[in-house]
Image (cartoon, rainbow, N blue to C red):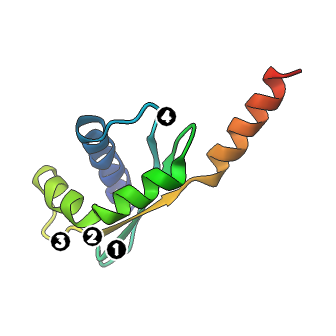
Amino acid sequence: MEQVNRELQRVVSRWLQSNFQSEDLLTVTSASVTRDLGQAIITLGARNGIDRYVDTLNSKSRRIKDEIKKSLPWKTIPNLEFRADREGDTITKVEEILDNL
């Protein structure tokens, strides 16, 4: 399953780089696919406005799924659900505090 997760993370990352404009360093921090390949949680990190990106990508998840299936050799492509990586928010806040010392 770990290989499936990594492959999906790689493909979604490439799709974002090619199709989604962001000045906030939007990154895919993880992907977690259910065993039946029915559902995938894609966790995203960004410097700013992560919730806006998550909302936008979730609203386009069906189209994204249709586009990334061309890059995956799987018979079943999971439904995609994007979530915010809150650990990244914490890291950004710590960096800001350290910068202000």
Label 1 belongs to which residue?
39
Give how far apart the Cα atoms at labels 3 and 2 are.
Answer: 6 Å
Provide the secondary structure element on which disc 3 rests: loop
Provide the secondary structure element on which disc 4 rests: loop
Per the rendering, the mark at residue 78 is 2
Measured as percent of width and height from the top left, residue 57 is found at 35, 57
Question: In this orientation, which residue lies closer to the viewer: 25 or 11?
Answer: 25
Q: Is residue 48 visible?
A: yes
The earlier-in-sequence mark between 4 and 2 is 4
Label 4 belongs to which residue?
24
Q: Are marks 1 and 2 in contact (CB under 8 Å)?
A: yes
Identified by mark 1, the residue type is Gln
Q: Are marks 3 and 2 in contact (CB under 8 Å)?
A: yes
The earlier-in-sequence mark between 4 and 3 is 4
Q: Residue at x 27, y 61 (%)?
A: 60
Q: Is residue 73 visible?
A: no
Q: Are marks 4 and 2 in contact (CB under 8 Å)?
A: no
Give how far apart the Cα atoms at labels 4 and 2 are.
Answer: 27 Å
Give how far apart the Cα atoms at labels 4 and 3 are.
Answer: 32 Å
* Mark 3 closeness class: few <14, some 14–19, many ≥20 residues within 10 Å: few
Question: Relative to 76, is 99 on the left or the right?
Answer: right
Give how far apart the Cα atoms at labels 1 and 2 are.
Answer: 5 Å
Q: Residue at x 33, y 43 (%)?
A: 13
Give how far apart the Cα atoms at labels 3 and 1 are.
Answer: 10 Å
Question: Relative to 41, is 71 on the left or the right?
Answer: left
Provide the secondary structure element on which disc 2 rests: loop
Quadrant position of the N terminus in the picture: bottom left
Q: Please tell me whether mark 4 or mark 2 is closer to you in this view.
A: 4
The earlier-in-sequence mark between 1 and 4 is 4
